[in-house]
Every structure is written in C-alpha cells, then in structure tokens.
Image: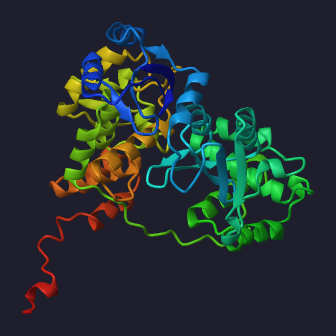
Amino acid sequence: MIYYYAKIHRGEKRLFVQTPNQKEVTNKLKAISECRWSQTEKAWHFDATNVIYKKIKEAFPEMKALTESTATALQTAKQPIANGIKNNTVKARQYIAGRYYIIAAYDPMLNSIIKSFPYATYHKATKYWSVAMDEKQKKALADYCKTKLLTLIWENDFQKNTIKPRTPSYEITAYRNCPDEMVEKLETMRYSSNTLKTYKQLFEEFINYYSTKEIDDITEQEIVAYVRYLVKERGISASYQNQAINSIKFYYEKVAGGIRKFYHLERPLREQKLPTVLATEEVIAMIKVTANLKHKLLLMMCYSAGLRISELLNLRVADIDSKRMQIKIKSAKGKKDRYSLLSEKILPSLREYYKTYLPKDYLFEGIGGGPYSERSMQSVVKEALEKAGIVKHATVHTLRHSFATHLLESGTDLRYIQTLLGHSSSKTTEVYTHVTSRALKGIISPLDSLDF
C-alpha cells in the first residue's frame, strides 16, 4: 500500500509518500517531479502543491492518506530500534541542562512532535534524537505517551557536567522581562534584530540573578560580581562575556541616563581563532549533492557573493541587478549598504528558480511569506556537508570565509575583498592571509629535506 501525508520539513511544507521498496515504484515517483528521500521518515518527499499531488494520485490511484491509526498500525509492525528499546517504551535522557536524548521505536506521529521541539536533531548512527525541552515540551511528550499507552522513562546523565547552566525562566519565581524602555531604545537606535534579541536575553539573565532587587538599585560591585559568576561558574565564552557587559552598560548608560562607566569589568582578550575554510572541491561537492533547486541556489548565492546569513535571507527580488551583475546588500552589519558580485554561473539557476517559486518580495521566502528562516538555512548547509562527506566543522558563515580566501588565493587585492565583505577595518580582512594556502605552497617543510 502507498500512503501520503503533508508536513513541515526544514522550514518548508512537503508532501511525503511512503511506498513499497520496489524499483519500478521508485522510478515512477521520480518521473513525476523532483523528489528527495528522507531517511528519518522512510519516505520520498515533494513540493506540496496541488499539481504534484494530482500527478501522484493519477500514477497511484490506490494511494491513501496516512492517518494516525494507520501510522500506529504500521509502526507496530516495524522492528524495534537499537539499544534494546521496545516498541512500547520511550526514554528521555537528560545529558545537560535543558537538553535531552529521546530514544524510541520508529513512530511517524511521535517524530512529528519531536521535530517541533527546539534544536531537534536526529542521529542516524545511534538512532536517537537530541532536543531542548522545558516544561511545555515535557508535557507534550508525556501527553502523547499517555494517549498511546507508551511507557515514558526519564533518565539523568547531567550530574557528570560541572558547568552551571543558565537557570530556565520557568524555574524563576516572578520572572522579570527586559524593561520596555530598553527594547524601545534599542529599536529607536536601529540596532539589528539579532543584537536586540541578544541584549534582551542577556539583560534578563542579569536582572533575574538579582531578582529581589530593583534594577536601578543594583550596585557597581554587584555588577562586577555577576560577571565573575558568569566566567567562573557558568563557564561562558569570551564573546558571551563581552556581550553581557555591553547589554548591562547599554541599560545603565543609554536607558537609565547614567554617565559612561567602565565598572572595573575585566574585558576578556579577544580570541584569535582562524576561520574554517572549505576547499574549492568541497564547495563543488556540496552544490552537486544538493538536489533541491532552492537549497542549491541558497548555497551558491552565499558562496558566490560572500554573504552573511542575515544578508542572504534578507535579499529582495529587486536587489538582484543582472544588467550590472551586482547584488545590492542593504542595511548590513553597521547599517551600511554595499554591492557584491553576481556570478554569471548562477544566473540560469536564478531564473529557473524565479519561474518555479515566483517569490513576491524576499528572494528566498518561507512558507507563510517573509524571509526564509535561519534555522532552515543552517539545516541546508548541514545536510549538504553530510551528503558530500565533509567532516570539517563548517557552518553557513564558512561559505563566506571560503569566498574571501579563494578570492585572495586567485590574486584579488585585499582592499577589494574588504569592500565586498563590508569590513570597516582592513585588519578584519587580513585574517584570510593566515589561512590562504597560496603563501604556504612555496615553503618546503624541513622534513622533506631529510633522507630516511
């Protein structure tokens, strides 16, 4: 029997089709439209459009909708997963504060619930999920297990971790939100949405650390003590520490109207980390293994123009200038506009994409309109890396680093690269001179001169 169902997958609505493992059935599906295999769902999935649904229905008139009852029946017939988990058992194992592994037999409905949890990731090798859960997610999991008569087992491996986590908001009595005045000030001063979100979160952590004190009564000594607590007990990074200090200073100086102070806060030394860079062959491999046109174009656009993830996802259709072969990037970091390159190789794919998806405003739109989500873009890169067999710890931003490094290696002047990237200081761009392989190629290792 062939079943179908629709669901949100990687930020897009997709039509899933479960079929018998028969070559002729698979070939018939592939002939209908571009489709991809989901190892997690054990099903082929297509763009969820009426046209594609009608074509599949015509090819397979016997196809039925996958209801909750049929899914349960199918799940019962499947063999249990590894680790000895039985079909009627679900384990939730806490491994760090707020983070859990969920281990269960295959269940499409349960998978749909788990996928809605924050940071849900399926690990193929061990056949379990890692998710973030607070009381809301715990209740959803418990309710489902109760309805399906599944035994839910809670386990705790968290005592092995010595770093003190951030206290969840639901564990704080009379939790205090960031003052409206601070949010309004950030908006008025046109801070980016990411900075606003970060400052708001960090300042809330600070004021709830001193939950019994009025915000304006917190002393300079207490601010210093709080930052030391973040470093010593929370084990935060240098970047987190700087942002926490900035959020506190913003409130007391910009919102409360106090004079500029340094609060004797120890600013951490800036971590001198070299960026991860992909080889040109690895970039090609990522593009080749990505079948979905939209996902392929996201990768190509990010790499070919050296865009930050926010710049890529905020591109409008009108920002593409095919006559001048330029991309206009508006209100980028530092509220600056700039132009970057529009690759000639990307134009055919871009035109095909436009005819297929018909974006109205944003070049890459989400399901309900508006820009494509950052999380979905991160998933696109992660999937491409896995399929291409690339083991480097790479992210969306790695494509930007690779763009700059490859330009430098091909002989492009560092000043032009600085302009294309939108760096205010040439020192920021100079980091790519440390990762380029061009300068190292002429140097012979002393080991090569030894006779064995």
Q: Quadrant of the C terminus?
A: bottom left
Q: Is residue 89 left or right of residue 19?
A: right
Name of the residue lying farthest toward the front: 77
Q: Is residue 287 left or right of residue 63?
A: left
Q: Is residue 431 left or right of residue 246?
A: left
Q: Is residue 96 left or right of residue 216?
A: left
Give above or below for 322 relative to 393. Answer: above
66 or 174, nearer to the observer: 66
37 or 78, nearer to the observer: 78
Q: Quadrant of the N terminus?
A: top left
Residue 211, x across and y down, in percent: 88, 55
Question: Could you tell me which residue is drawn at 56 percent across and 44 percent down?
Answer: 105
Residue 133, x across and y down, in percent: 68, 47
**Residue 18 in sight here:** yes
Give above or below for 230 relative to 250. Answer: below
259 or 376, nearer to the observer: 376
100 or 336, nearer to the observer: 100
**Residue 249 in sight here:** no
Residue 447, x across and y down, in percent: 15, 87
